[in-house]
Amino acid sequence: MGGYVLRRLAQSAVLIFAVATLVAVLVRLIPGDPVQVLLGEGQATPERVRLLREQLGLEKPVHVQYLEWLGRLVRGDLGVSLISRRAIGPDLLQRLPRTLELTVAATLLALAVGLPAGILAAVNRNGPVDLAVSVLALLGLSAPVFVLGTLLVLVFGLYLRVFPATGFVDLTQDPWGHVSRLLLPAATLAAAMAGVIARMARSAMLVLAEDYLRTARAKGLTERAVVFGHALPNALIPVVAVVGVQMGSLLGGSVIVEYIFNWPGLSTYLLQGIAQRDYPVVQAVVLVVSALFILLNLLTDLSYGLLDPRIRYG
Amino acid sequence: MNVKMQVYNGLVRYWRKGEVVPDLAESWETPDPTTYIFRLRRGVKFHDGSDFTARDVKASLERILDPKVGATRRADIRDIKEIVVVDDYTVRLNLSRPNAALLAYLARPECAILSARFLEAGGDPNVRAVGTGPFRLVSREPGVRIVLEKNPDYFRQGRPYLDRVVFMAYPDENTRVTAIRAGDVDFIEYVPWKDTAALQREPHIQVFSGYGPFMCLIFNVRQKPFDDPRVRRAFGYAVNRQSIIDVVFFGRGAPITGGLVPREHWAYNPNLEGTYTYDPNRARALLKEAGYGDGLRVRLLSTSQYGMHQSTAEVVQNDLKKVGVQVDLELYDWPTTVDKHNKGEYQFRVHGLAPEVNDPDFLTQFFRTDSPYTRSNGFSDPEVDRLLDEARSTLDQGRRKALYGELERRLLELAPWVYLTWREQSEAALKKVRGYEHLPGGLAFVSAITLEEVWLEA
Amino acid sequence: MDSIFSRPTMTAAIIRRPGLLRRLVRSPRVAGPATFLAMVTVLSLLAPLLASHDPLEMRPPRALEAPGREFLLGTDEYGRDILSRLLYGGRVSLAVAVGSILLAGVVGVTLGLVGGYYGGVWEALTMRTVDLLLSIPPILLAIAVVAFLGSNLTNLIMVIGILYVPRFARVVHGSTLAVKQREFVEAARVLGARDRRILLVAILPNILAPIIVQASVSLGFAILLESGLSFLGLGAPPPTPSWGGMVGAGRGYMHLSPWPVLWPALTVWAVILAFNLLGDGFRDLLDPKLRA
């Protein structure tokens, strides 16, 4: 197991490096550059373009820029934004917890809704509850995030005025204000995940319940005791795996939610970076997100082994 | 730019009706057409506590004129040959030739006066803001928010009224509208046209509007088929401007059938009205004359990032189909569009622009040979250049009006651009927000200059 | 989002069972959604015959009308007939879905097979390539493709296809791992079959079940993804109507008129539902271990 973990860690490091390189190339290859963004159409005379390129260090060959970037990275320096001329590290550190918070809140919400719903459906297999859960789960899965988000804002933020519709305040400044602004985006993100969890929990329960029921009936236990005492704990294994995978995709998938709710997390930072061709910002965000994503995947894979002693790594 | 206006002052500035008024200069005189003498305010302090003097004016303007800095307004105030500090509170500008539009450009926020001491110490105004303005910069998180607080030492007594201003970035227009409707914010810029009427109906919201920005088509005249003015003119007749107004701007616009100098301006020429109307037959005839009677297929560059650009392109596409022109849309994100524009990699494109100054000299930026716009589309006409230069260096308003009339007629004839519509530009605020004013025309975008006189009614 | 339904460890079905096709057709859990999807496809294909209006014709004065006699499902923000656009939009959305999933399937299955069968370096290479694909922000990828190659349907198919490669690769990889231990693969190897033959004849047919399940589920979500890309301005280029594009455009007018977003959203939902039910049905039939 130790050897496997080490090997995967090494692979992860290589992978993160590859992602960083690929993104550094990709973002420079797409048309439009930060100089054009800064100058726009009315100001981009050749002299000014040249000047600004020099000021921003963009006149150097790409591989030199890349090596310099790597050199700084090794020292823990993520570089300076080309547009705002601010250090990226602190800005990124400010945004990272906001995205993590949104992801965790969405995961918890999804578990709180999806797990009971899935179990309920399994217990009432093929009954009306089962059907309702199936349909709702697919509704959650198939609702475009931006439609759902807009709907939630309109209903809860505007018509019912239960929560503030938009914006962000720091947790330290106004804790309730912070949490109340977190709920709608978290719920929007949670919808699809809750659907996945419900469906997963249901089918895992069903498969297991069948095996266990046979044994349990022989032992004279009630169906209820079997479901909650035996099937449920085992059904949790695939659910945990799902949650891991899903959280990973939430990290990258919160773009639209952060955008609609004006949640100043990593995704909006990335979106802004792309929209301004702010190369170092894009590189930094992708680096951090993909590192998190890859580590989460690794943890998920390893957790199979911990949860299910039958799975062994060679 | 909004923040710039709050943190800095200029020598002069635009005010409520679009007029140029004193700012850091108390008064000025022009003893001869190539000399401006500004008398400066006394007792003004920068945010770092230092005194404002003529040295700051000299340092700031010289910074703009320095080609190595690459400042936005350099080309516009290039006629300034020399900046002379007469005494601590008097500055003289010697021009290389008369320039009727100089004050109009000096009033732009880009001509803000910075601290000479700050600049000499190597300070970068892109990083730190040391100005004399009504507000001081407290903190900023790019793309999220900027926090300003009142400058207690501001030279205008009793201003500003607000203690603290927070600028929040709301990139999504729907979220922005929801934010004001829900009262999450007190004020929003760039009200989407589809929502203006609904916001006006809200009892707790007021809307400030004016025409100013305009939509247009820009042709790359280097290549076929747009090297032929007849094709460009044909497009001018083929597009139904009213349907752009209805569809894209929900009725909140006005067709441009004449020149770009707006109706309320002294240089406006009413005789040009009606030059371009919706006339598909004429469009077809012109296309036929140009040899494209059997149809034509062209690519239209626009951006998917801004709804009004994309929708305008869609309407243009729809209208041109009716005169036998098949239009393929090329929709990119904004930076790609800008890149293609600057490299001249397009056949024709949709654009939304606004006059940046309240003087018809704004046409120079759009049409003078070697401006970034003409560099992009390849348009160059000696007569246009001559008229632009002459009108800029003529001080007599009547004579200027005649020159601009002639210029605009020529531009309509050559049609390097086809003007489509004026569009309404609006801000919305809660009713308790008082003292704000929407500046006329293209100055709409510097309306935030009035923020120092805004207060909140209890 | 749904890859777990076909977690590799659970699947090792053999598809070549007698009478399978007949059972598929007879099973209401497959035939029901399949019929619905066939109907949707036929309706879309017949759009030129069925549509009551030109889907592109703008009628500014009649924008955002509620459903009525002339426009059965109402009009959008340009006054275009929503029903006609739905019919035409189906062609684009279904074509994009099918095209992108085909692409994703071919590439993903190849990666998964190679990685799973050869193991070692190949496994590390293919699976880490998949991780790499997953790590690139989809929006960056989409912008890059659109900016380089232009916004047209082929490129849209490519973007969505690339984004779906990892799902297929992972599922196939896991299934291949499970199947390659089986006796018939061993047998083939002992008999001296070449790798390519083993992969195509012994392994691939035996992992078709999870691939089919994955494909049917992904087809639905590809339509959803197209709507997300449309929202970001990277979807099917106008004026071509697509369901996703309609949802994306309609979202901005939700508070003025619910219809432009409601109808395409309902359609997308129903189609995704059908594809998922189809996937469930396939799985139940093809994968006895999971039959509930």
Image: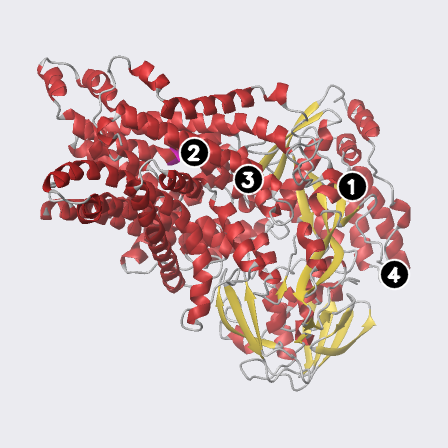
Q: Quadrant of residue A15?
A: top left
Answer left or right for C96 relative to B300: left
Q: CA distance from mark 4 to mark 2?
A: 70 Å
Q: Quadrant of residue B447?
A: bottom right
Chain under callout 1: B
Residue drawn where x is 19% and y is 48% of the image: A225
Earlier residue among tags 2 and 3: 3
Please determine whether, in this image, residue C151 is positioned above or below residue A186: above
Q: CA distance from mark 2 to mark 3?
A: 17 Å
Numbered disc 4: secondary structure: helix
Q: Residues at badges 4 and 3 in contact (C-beta under 8 Å)?
A: no
x then y, percent, for residue B189: 64, 60
Chain under callout 3: C
Q: Which residue is mark 3?
A: C247
Q: Which residue is mark 2?
A: C273
Q: CA distance from mark 1 to mark 2?
A: 43 Å
**Which mark is in front, 1 or 2?**
2
x then y, percent, for residue B368: 73, 48
Q: Quadrant of residue A38?
A: bottom right
Answer left or right for B203 relative to A164: right
Numbered disc 1: secondary structure: helix
